[in-house]
Image: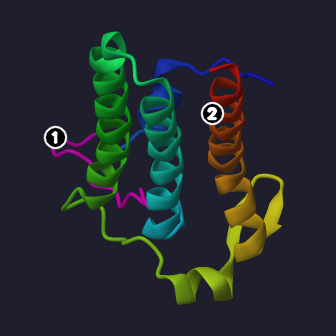
Amino acid sequence: MSKQLSQTDLVQLAELSDSPVRTKVNRSFELPAGLYLATAGGYLAFLAIMIVCLKNPELVLPMAVIVFSVIAGFGLCYKWVAMRPDNGTKTLTWGQFSNRGVQTLSGHLTAFEASAQVLTLPILIVFWGLCGAVVVSLAS
């Protein structure tokens, strides 16, 4: 429930300061870098399958833009984790990840369960691209 506070109550509760508040931020998402690389590799593998399978010169520019977007998106995530000085944490190593697992809103996940959740979509997309390649090759 909400409660109406007077100005005097707010002044008593608040601490006024001219200096900015510095906080420690964990931007690592508690996953090792290999999972990010595998995810990006899955998306890029799908694009490579489509490029090789379709071989249409009119798709050069759209495919280049999509490849650039995937690389830029994952590169931005890498730079976000690597930002300093407020980020004192690093990504977990595979050993730490396999020992600790990861805590999510729905509960604790082991390393295998978390990896399965992260890699399910990229793997399905790669298989979708392979199915499309089979269809294109049979139609030719």
- In the rendered structure, which amino acid carries the disc numbered 2? Ala
Q: Which mark is residue 18?
A: 1
Q: Which residue is mark 2?
A: 133
User: Is residue 98 shown left or right of residue 68?
Assistant: right
- 24 drawn magenta: yes
- Residue drawn at the location 34% of the way across and 57% of the way down: 81
Question: Start and end of the magenta stretch?
Answer: 16-28
Give the vertical position of 8 relative to 12 (above or below).
above
> Residue 37, how many percent across, how many down?
44, 59
Q: Earlier in the sequence, mark 2 or mark 1?
A: 1
Q: Nearer the viewer, residue 40 or 7?
A: 40
Closer to the camera, 13 or 79? 79
Q: Is residue 83 magenta?
A: no
Q: Which type of secondary structure does the marked residue at label 2 adopt? A: helix
In whole angstroms, how far apart are the C-alphas of marks 2 and 1? 62 Å
Which residue is located at x 31 percent, y 70 percent? 88
Q: Is residue 94 above or below residue 61?
A: below
